[in-house]
Amino acid sequence: MRKIKRIYLGLPESFKDEVLWVAREYRTNSLSHEPGGSDVVVEYYEDGVLGYDWIKTPSRYISAIWTKGISEVYTDYKEYNEDAQLEIIKEKIKRIFARKHDDENYEKEPFKEVWNSETSDKLPWELLEEFDFPDMFSNDRAIIRLLLNAKKAD
């Protein structure tokens, strides 16, 4: 397997030494093993800085890993209203950066600060939607709409 060149363009200078890129063996989504997509870097207050590359739908991915992890501490987290969830997130996550790239702009596309605990009033995954590759699930959404419409007709 070829060595992946890590890009830090647009990230704080210290991140070059701080980001722990999550290895493929810990990535359960098969799409995360296919090149391309978006890269996301999450800076936690107490757990360091984690990087995830080759993410096709960062909004879903970050929501899923966050919900899985926080549900171990707050067992009823999913039942909290959005404001309560946001407050918990702001206690744990400091900032989130993302970049969307393809082969042509891989080394040139900078990271952008997407979410900041001091200034953001939305859930992080809502802001990460702009980094999703929309065609990844367009067929799934169409099938779901057809099934829902068929069920309504019954």
Image (cartoon, rainbow, N blue to C red):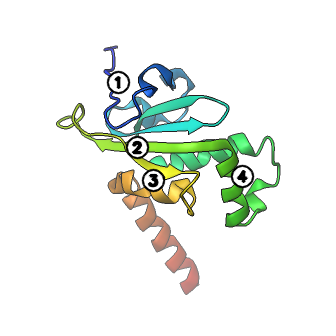
SS of the residue under disc 2:
strand
**Residue wearing tag 3:** 128
- Mark 4 closeness class: few <14, some 14–19, many ≥20 residues within 10 Å: some
**Residue wearing tag 1:** 6
Mark sitting earlier along the chain (4/2): 4
Amino acid carrying mark 3 in the image: Leu
SS of the residue under disc 4:
helix
Alpha carbon separation for disc pair 1 and 4: 30 Å
Alpha carbon separation for disc pair 4 and 3: 18 Å
SS of the residue under disc 3:
helix
Q: Quadrant of the N terminus?
A: top left
Alpha carbon separation for disc pair 2 and 3: 8 Å
Using the image, determine if residue 56 lies above or below residue 128: above
Mark sitting earlier along the chain (2/3): 2
Residue 57 visible to an observer of this rendering: no
Tell me where residue 55 appears, x and y as whole percent.
42, 40
Amino acid carrying mark 2 in the image: Ala
Amino acid carrying mark 1 in the image: Arg
In the rendering, which numbered label is found on residue 88?
A: 4
Mark sitting earlier along the chain (1/3): 1
Alpha carbon separation for disc pair 1 and 2: 13 Å
Using the image, determine if residue 14 lies above or below residue 113: above
**Residue wearing tag 2:** 98
